[in-house]
Image (tube, helix red, strand yellow):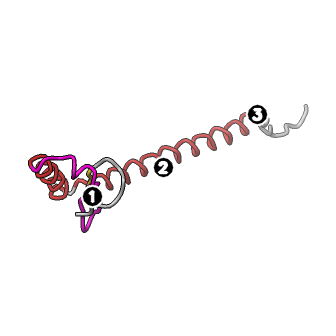
């Protein structure tokens, strides 16, 4: 448990070796029962590996965004190429005149 900083929260950080951070002002303001409840709550996050889940969720969101952007870029390129072909007149085979 770390007690440095000037923020106003308690949080868990880390994936492989998690740590609970608590600001001294918060620790001083809580009663012993409140501090115990807060630490038990943060330990539950560590045991459930919530930070790992959050990391994979963020990676999945980034991957989905990249797939979406790639689809938009490919669609735009396809439309532009199709438009060029639609505007260019088709070459007609020359017929002998009779």
Looking at the picture, how far across and down is residue 42, in whole percent? 18, 53
Q: CA distance from mark 3 to mark 2?
A: 32 Å
| Residue at position x 29%, y 48% in the image | 9
Instruction: Determine which residue is flagged by label 2.
Output: 66
Looking at the picture, how far across and down is residue 83, in whole percent? 70, 36
- Report the mark closest to the observer, 3 or 1: 1
Q: Is residue 93 left or right of residue 8?
A: right
Instruction: Determine which residue is flagged by label 3.
Output: 87
Asked if residue 17 is among those painted magenta in the image, a careful observer would answer: yes
Looking at the picture, how far across and down is residue 34, in whole percent? 13, 46
Q: What is the number of the mark on residue 21?
A: 1
Q: CA distance from mark 3 to mark 1?
A: 64 Å
- Secondary structure under the numbered disc 2 in the rendered image: helix
Label located before the other in sequence (3 or 1): 1
Crowd tier of the residue under label 3, counting other residues whose Cα lies within 10 Å: few below 14, some 14–19, many 20 or above: few
Crowd tier of the residue under label 2, counting other residues whose Cα lies within 10 Å: few below 14, some 14–19, many 20 or above: few
The quarter of the picture where residue 48 lies is bottom left
């Amino acid at each position: 448990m770390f007690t440095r900083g000037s923020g106003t929260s308690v949080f868990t950080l880390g994936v492989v070796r998690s740590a609970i951070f608590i600001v001294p002002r918060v620790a001083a303001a809580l009663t012993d029962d409140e501090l115990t409840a807060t630490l038990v709550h943060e330990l539950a996050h560590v045991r459930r590996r919530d930070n790992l889940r959050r990391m994979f969720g963020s990676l999945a969101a980034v991957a989905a965004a990249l797939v979406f952007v790639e689809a938009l870029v490919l669609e735009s390129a396809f439309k532009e190429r199709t438009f060029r072909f639609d505007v260019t007149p088709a070459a007609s085979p020359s017929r002998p005149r009779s």
